[in-house]
């Protein structure tokens, strides 16, 4: 099957046009027609010479963007969209309401191979990674649902850095000035700590923000909760994060899910504060959201925050949204929830 033109960056289109004997300078017009002017047929690309369109039609196809199969709306206005991609690959994305704007939370994979014990997506295993077109389709669906979409996070289903080439391509497509022109500095990519990609991002010209899920400060506990610790130990992950911050003169977002009675003791906050000392960061504390239902009370969360603040950590409590439709952090289960 011919590749879909929607999955190409502008640089990819330039290369393709050169290979087809056409001027690469037409790539901007092609990209604009596909990603902003709503072209649905290669025979009719507005603003593109007919000769160029015919050449592209010999090598590519232009399929309609996939549409969500189902939408759920939470009491707080959170919207969750379910997609069924080819091969019965189910994935969800979420529109999160804010005071003056909305955030789109996108999935990078159908399921996830990381196996984090507290995460509904991890329990599914990995079906497959999503293509750039499937990632862009989620964004476009979120854009239709939002009043003022100003930020984008790759914090949905899957580990973005285990599908990095496709995620990176989607980032470039969405941020291109001839397309949606969504600023990269308004995008955040979250990882459990895939070190090679953190290192790549350190020297990359991408301007996306980095978020790292810590899970636990104790290596043995973290390995039980997040098996990726066995592949990418947190000590090495944070070494890569420190270099990222130094080289890019940037802050990083660190995420810590509070599991009552598991990783929320005073000894845990003390170990965590020591572990991240000196890293320019914002630490988000996330209450545990059990799969399929509303979150549970986290009696220690405020005390945990105060212990960290007293130790000099910029610690914040994340206000979880959409738990009544299983759309909060850790609850996405691709239709297996409600």
Image (cartoon, rainbow, N blue to C red):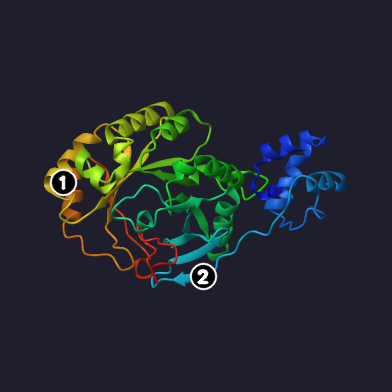
User: Would you say 153 lies left or right of 252 here?
Assistant: right
Pointer 1 residue? 307
How packed mark 2 is, by other alpha carbons closer than 10 Å (few <14, some 14-19, many 20 or more), is few
Split into 4 quadrants, where in the image is the C terminus? bottom left
Dividing the picture into quarters, in which one does residue 18 lie?
Answer: top right
In front: label 1 or label 2: 2
Pointer 2 residue? 70
Residue 292 pos. (x, y %)? 34, 67
On screen, residue 1 above or below 229: below
On screen, residue 111 above or below 212: below
Q: Secondary structure at mark 2?
A: strand
**Residue at figure coordinates x 16%, y 60% from the top left:** 299
**Residue at figure coordinates x 50%, y 40% from the top left:** 164
Residue 22 pos. (x, y %)? 82, 36
Residue 276 pos. (x, y %)? 25, 36
Alpha carbon distance from label 1 to label 2: 42 Å
Q: Secondary structure at mark 1?
A: helix
On screen, residue 258 above or below 270: below
């Amino acid at each position: 099957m011919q590749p879909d033109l929607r999955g190409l960056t502008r640089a990819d289109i330039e290369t393709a046009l050169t290979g087809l004997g056409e001027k690469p300078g037409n790539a901007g017009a092609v990209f604009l027609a596909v990603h902003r002017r709503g072209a649905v047929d290669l025979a009719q690309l507005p603003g593109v010479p007919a000769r160029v369109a015919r050449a592209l039609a010999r090598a590519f196809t232009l399929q309609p963007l996939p549409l969500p199969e189902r939408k759920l709306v939470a009491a707080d206005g959170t919207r969750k969209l379910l997609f069924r991609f080819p091969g019965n690959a189910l994935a969800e994305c979420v529109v999160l309401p804010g005071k003056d704007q909305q955030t789109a939370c996108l999935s990078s994979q159908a399921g996830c191979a990381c196996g984090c014990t507290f995460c509904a997506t991890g329990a599914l295993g990995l079906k497959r990674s999503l293509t750039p077109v499937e990632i862009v389709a989620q964004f476009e669906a979120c854009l239709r649902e939002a009043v003022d979409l100003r930020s984008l996070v790759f914090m949905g289903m899957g580990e973005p850095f285990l599908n990095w080439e496709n995620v990176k391509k989607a980032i470039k497509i969405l941020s291109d000035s001839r397309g949606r022109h969504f600023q990269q500095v308004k995008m955040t990519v979250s990882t459990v700590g895939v070190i090679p990609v953190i290192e790549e991002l350190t020297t990359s010209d991408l301007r996306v923000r980095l978020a790292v899920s810590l899970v636990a400060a104790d290596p043995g506990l973290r390995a039980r909760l997040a098996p990726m610790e066995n592949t990418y130990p947190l000590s090495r992950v944070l070494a890569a994060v420190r270099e990222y911050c130094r080289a890019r003169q940037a802050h990083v977002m660190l995420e810590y899910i509070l599991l009552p009675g598991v990783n929320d003791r005073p000894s845990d906050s003390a170990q965590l504060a020591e572990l991240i000392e000196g890293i320019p960061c914002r630490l988000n504390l996330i209450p545990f959201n059990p799969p399929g239902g509303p979150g549970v009370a986290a009696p220690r969360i405020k005390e945990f925050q105060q212990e960290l603040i007293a130790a000099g950590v910029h610690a914040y409590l994340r206000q979880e949204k959409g738990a009544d439709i299983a759309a909060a952090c850790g609850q996405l289960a691709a239709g297996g929830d409600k």
